[in-house]
């Protein structure tokens, strides 16, 4: 399945730009305090994770595609992991 994401992910960070209104809505609807820790599963290239991290949350960004993760923004509150939603475990 990663091949699909590697294929569509080539330009993903240039075509999928976070909408600030959606970021605000996510934070408001989830009632997220600034120090929240969030797992963003299927994060793609991390645009929305970065925007939410900029609001003070810590993000565990999880994506299967190396191509998408290679476009990942760096942020002190954004930690990247390789993985699939159906293969997560607590250890």
Image (cartoon, rainbow, N blue to C red):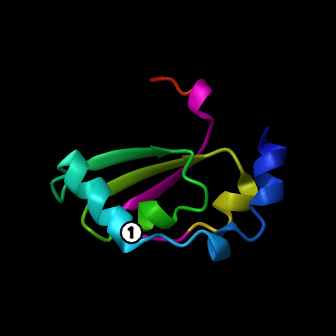
* Horizontal and vertical percent position of residue 29: 23, 49
Quickly name the residue at label 1: 51
Q: Nearer the viewer, residue 85 or 83?
A: 85
Residue at the bottom extreme of this rendering: 14
* Horizontal and vertical percent position of residue 77: 36, 62
Which residue is pictured at 43% across the width and 60% down the height?
A: 49
Estimate how packed mark 1 is, as few (under 14), some (14 to 19) or many (20 or more) residues with alpha carbons within 10 Å. Answer: some
Above/below status of 26 relative to 74: above
* Horizontal and vertical percent position of residue 14: 65, 76
Q: Give the range drawn in magenta.
A: 73-86
User: What number of labels is visible?
Assistant: 1
Q: Nearer the viewer, residue 83 or 48?
A: 48
Above/below status of 63 relative to 18: above
Q: Would you say residue 37 is visible in this rendering?
A: yes
* Horizontal and vertical percent position of residue 65: 71, 50
Q: Nearer the viewer, residue 63 or 80?
A: 63
Which quadrant holds residue 27? bottom left
């Amino acid at each position: 399945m990663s091949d699909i994401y590697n294929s569509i992910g080539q330009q993903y960070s240039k075509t999928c730009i976070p909408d600030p209104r959606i970021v605000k809505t996510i934070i408001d609807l989830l009632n997220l305090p600034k120090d929240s820790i969030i797992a963003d599963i299927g994060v793609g290239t991390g645009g929305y994770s970065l925007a939410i991290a900029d609001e003070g949350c810590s993000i565990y960004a999880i994506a299967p595609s190396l191509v998408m993760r290679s476009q990942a923004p760096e942020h002190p509150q954004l930690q990247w992991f390789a993985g699939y939603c159906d293969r997560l475990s607590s250890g």
